[in-house]
Amino acid sequence: MKRQEAYIVAALRTPVGRAIKGQFKQVRPDDLLVHTIKGVMAHCPHLDPSAIDDVLVGCAMPEAEQGMNMARSAVLLADLPASIPAMIMNRFCSSGLQTIATAADKIALGEAHLMLAGGAESMSMVPIGGHNYCVNPRTLTEPKYQGISYNMGTTAEIVAEKWQVTREEQDAFACLSHARALKAQKEQRFAKEIIPIPVNQEMVTQDEGPRASDLESLSQLNPVFKEKGTVTAGNSSQMSDGAGMTLVASAAAVKKYQLTPLARFVGYSVVGVAPEVMGIGPIAAIPKVLEKTGLSLENIDWIELNEAFAAQALAVIKELNLNPEKVNPYGGAIALGHPLGATGTMRTVTALHALHQHALDYAMITMCVGTGMGAAGIFQRV
C-alpha cells in the first residue's frame, strides 16, 4: 500500500517560562495545552473540529497536575467535540517530537486524516523524576545497570570526558545560545509561532530564558554534578514550563478544509544508546533518519539540536561534523529553556517557521533522551 503524505498545517507554541519562579509558575500545564489547541484551531477557520481523528500529547512526567490523561482533559477544556479521543505519550525529552511522528505515521497508513500532536510540561508543578521518584533497586546495586539511575548531569560529565569537550568550549557554546536567542527576539523571529497568553492580567508574549551572558560570569559558576567537573548551571538547559501544538493533515484533508501546509513530514528515527552516555543519542539517530529518507547532511538547512547540556550538544556536533552555523541559529535550550515533553514540539514549531522566514528547504529536529536514546525528525518546507 502506498504511504500517504502527511503535512504540518499549523504549528504554534506558548512562550517558555522559567520553572519555579517564572511567568508560568502558577499556570497549570493543561491550561497551557488548552491555549495551544485553541490557537491551532483558530488558525484553521474552515476546519470542522469533529473531523479530528485523535490528539496526541507528549509529557515526560505525566502525574499530578499533568496526570490522569491530561490530553483528554485539555480536549474537553478547549471545547472541542467530546467525540475526539486523546492520549499522553512519553518518550521523555523527545515526547513532543514523537507525537508528531506518530500522527504522521497514522496518516501515512490511511488510519487518520487530521491529528493534533503536541506536548506540554510544567517543571514548576512536576519536578524531574516526579514527586515520588523510585528507581529499581537493581540499578543501584548491580554495576551493569547503574547507568539507568545516573543523574543526567552525571552523564553529561561522562560525555564531556569521553568526547574531550572542555569547560571553555561549553561556556562559549552557552554564551552563543543566549546571544542568538536574544538576537532572534530582537528581530521578532518568534512572533508568528508564539501565542501570547494572559497571566495575572498581563500578556506574556516572549520566552523568559534568554539573557545577556558573558564568558567571565559563566566561568565563575561551580560544577554541579562532579567535583572539578565542567558541567554547570550556566552551560546546561534551563528547567522550564511551556506547551506546543501542531495540526498534521493528509493531502485529502488539506484540500477539503482549505488548509495551507507549512511543511511535509519526511521521516523520523529513534535509537537506543548506553544510558551512561545518553547525551550522544543524536549521533546514532541522525545517520539513521538520513539513511531512511535518502538525504544527506548537506541537504539539511536548519538543525534544532536540543541543548540538554552544552557538553553533549558539542559532542554531537564534533562527532557528526555538523555545520555550527546550521545548528540552533535562534539559540537552544540553554537560552530558550527545556520543558521536557513539550520541547520536541516547540523546537519543531520554531524550525518550520524559520524555514519560511529564510526560504530554506529541510529542517531536522533532534535530541538526546533520558535513559539512553536519541531521536531525529526531518521536515520539508512546502
Image: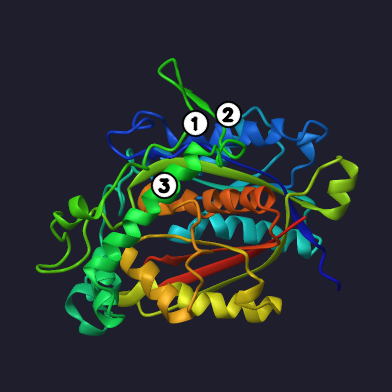
Reading the image, the residue beneath label 2 is 77
Give the distance between the C-alpha atoms of the residues marked 3 and 1, in whole angstroms. 21 Å
Relative height, residue 358 to residue 258 (above, below): below
Reading the image, the residue beneath label 1 is 31
**For the point 53% across and 28% down, which residue is it?**
196
**For the point 35% across and 28% down, which residue is it?**
26
What number of labels is visible? 3
Q: Quadrant of the N terminus?
A: bottom right
Give the distance between the C-alpha atoms of the residues marked 2 and 3, in whole angstroms. 28 Å
Q: Pick whichever of labels 2 and 1 is earlier in the sequence.
A: 1
Label 1 environment density (alpha carbons within 10 Å; few <14, some 14–19, many ≥20): some
Q: Are marks 2 and 1 in contact (CB under 8 Å)?
A: yes
Relative height, residue 79 to residue 117 (above, below): above
SS label for mark 1: helix
- Measured from the top left, where is residue 209 in percent x and y? 36, 41
Side (left or right) of 360 relative to 325 = right
Side (left or right) of 12 relative to 199 = right
- Measured from the top left, where is residue 128 in percent x and y? 31, 52
Reading the image, the residue beneath label 3 is 336
Residue type marked 2: Leu
SS label for mark 2: helix
Which numbered circle lies on residue 180? none
